[in-house]
Amino acid sequence: MLCNVVVNENSYFKIYKPYGYLSQFINNQNKRRNKKLLSDLFDLPEHVMAVGRLDEKSEGLLLLTTDGKFSNHITSSKIEKEYHVMVDGLITEVQIEALKKGVEITVNGKSYITKPCHVELLKDTSHIYDRFVRDKKHGETSWIKLVLTEGKFRQVRKMTSKIGYPTLRLVRTRIGDYSLETMQPGNIEEINY
């Protein structure tokens, strides 16, 4: 499902990064030789870059651009990033409040307290693309909405694990004013900046 896109100077796109893909176009590491890359989905010139990252097991909104200033703006702490997260177990208000206040995680081998953020239980997940994660016989799950203004390495996964509810599925649904809306995995749309 390779999509050809014509890129002009300072072009901007949003994609729905599917599960199982790295947020990069070129593989420069031997240990990742067999990994799926965005270049497997989209035929874009080399100067197009991903704005921020989603790890291989995460999915959802990823912005692409040729504009370094746009990239710096989007990755700044001024811009909210919204994640819809399936966790292992039935999360309680106590754990939601802990996430809101900030939890201690490890970043680059050092202890770090996450910034206060917005967290709420998601009761309606009909807007999330349905993908099998695990059989129900392995236990109950919950969905939460988590809105951050920071983006440490694997932060959301570390936060939910810290409170005893490991992340089973992570979908980024919004970055600032840009959102997935009705996009499906592998879709790409040109956006304005």
Image: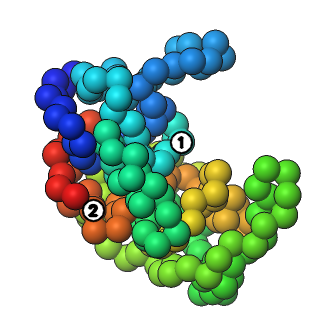
> Looking at the rendering, which quadrant does residue 93 occupy?
bottom right
Residue drawn at x 63%, y 52% as measured from the top left: 154
Does the image show residue 76?
A: yes
Q: Percent position (x, y) of residue 70?
A: 35, 54
The answer to whether residue 127 is left or right of residue 93 is left
Local crowd size for mark 1, using a 10 Å CA cut-off: few (<14), some (14–19), many (≥20): some
Residue drawn at x 16%, y 46% as measured from the top left: 190
Q: Percent position (x, y) of residue 139?
A: 58, 58
Colouring scheme applied when the structure was drawn: rainbow
Residue at mark 1 to residue at mark 2: CA–CA distance: 19 Å
* Label 1 element class: loop
Q: Percent position (x, y) of residue 65?
A: 31, 42
Dot 1 and dot 2 residues touching (CB under 8 Å): no
Q: What residue did someone put label 1 on?
A: 55
Q: What residue did someone put label 2 on?
A: 178
Does the image show residue 131?
A: no
Q: Nearer the viewer, residue 73 or 58?
A: 73
The C terminus: image quadrant = bottom left
> Looking at the rendering, which quadrant does residue 100 occupy?
bottom right
Residue 116, above or below 109: below
Residue 131, above or below 95: above
Mark 2: amino acid = Tyr
Of labels 1 and 2, earlier in sequence is: 1
Residue drawn at x 85%, y 51% as measured from the top left: 109
Residue drawn at x 43%, y 69% as measured from the top left: 79
The answer to whether residue 39 is left or right of residue 183 is right
